[in-house]
Amino acid sequence: MMELAGVRVAADVPFGMHESTPTAEFFRPAAEDERGDLELELVPVDRLPEMFDVRYEEPRRIYAGEGEGAGTYFKAHPDLPPYAFVSRRTVKDGCLRCEYLPGNEKYMDYADNLLTLMDLEATLLDFGALLLHASLIRWQGKGIVFTAPSGTGKSTQASLWEQHAGAEVLNGDRAALRVTDGAWRAYGLPYAGTSGIYRNESAPLAAVVALRQAGENRVRRIRGAEAFRYLYPETMIHRWDAEFERRATDLLLGLMGEAPVWLLECRPDGEAVALMKETIQKETEL
């Protein structure tokens, strides 16, 4: 059983699986008769469905269709034909079906390969979750996410909070944000970038902090179009799928309307931590 952003995914795999470091905390044995919120089913077939309505291509993935009719073809190498196909049509029935050509199990037999086959951002969107490029910390029992383009200092800022504020780093590169029991909650995921921190833990969301490097430390609250301008590029969205983009954008707008968003322009030092900490305490009564 996989647990991802509070969603239980039961995997039915007809071959042996190997554990992997990123997913170790996110897998557990299923209890007797336990069912997941979603069943991931891997099914060997003689041939894959004919390719249709191609929307976007990567070296090892081909995305077809949109919305409920979307599907993804997976390739082991850019020059090879697809070995597996996942259809999103089956999600409405509580099952995500992956068809694969026998003999290609070596491309799927590590636990983190299942996350790839699921198109995790698409799967969690079906459960009302956004995936954000962000470092996630837990401080005084609350979650704070630092989001920014790669190389800006997300994991550095999280580490500084650990050093100067006693925070716990739950994830170094990616977080899932989802409404649970009527409130936004931030979850760690099996993706951590260079930090190597993968914790299957979560916290009520207290703040979203957009980071930018600067010669001096300053912070201000941002809203509306300005907040959207900073957060949208860091949100994992299939931008070639209009329905996916609409649903994800609606969630992002909901997040911006309910959780405080800050712009922190800063140096990588303890003073930046103190400034942000004071601001959050003052505004959120932490």
Image: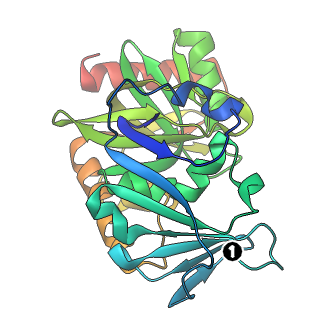
- Work out whether 229 lies above or below 282: below
Closer to the camera in the image, 226 or 246: 246
Q: Is residue 36 above or below residue 256?
A: above
Out of 43 and 138, give the one closest to the viewer. 43
Q: Residue 285, position in %: x, y?
A: 24, 18
Percent x, y of residue 175? 48, 40
Q: Say which element carries label 1.
A: loop
Colour setup of the view: rainbow
Nearer to the camera, 169 or 209:
169
The answer to whether residue 80 shows anywhere in this view is yes
Q: Residue at x 45, y 51 (%)?
A: 40
From the viewer's perspective, is 31 left or right of 134? left
Q: Is residue 198 above or below residue 131?
A: above
Task: Name which residue lies at 29% across and 16% down.
Answer: 286
The residue labelled by disc 1 is 58
The quarter holding residue 244 reads bottom left
Tally of numbered tags: 1
Q: Position of residue 121 (x, y in %)?
A: 47, 56
Residue at point 43% right, 29% down?
Answer: 144
Q: Is residue 94 left or right of residue 236?
A: left
Q: Is residue 209 above or below residue 138?
A: below
Residue at point 53% right, 30% down? 27
Write down the quadrant of residue 111 in the picture. Answer: top right
- Left or right for 75, reference 167: right
Q: Amino acid at mark 1?
A: Glu
Can residue 264 be seen here? The reply is no
Mark 1 is surrounded, within 10 Å at the Cα level, by few (under 14), some (14 to 19) or many (20 or more) other residues, namely few
Left or right position of 251 against 26: left
Between 189 and 153, the one lying in front of the other is: 189
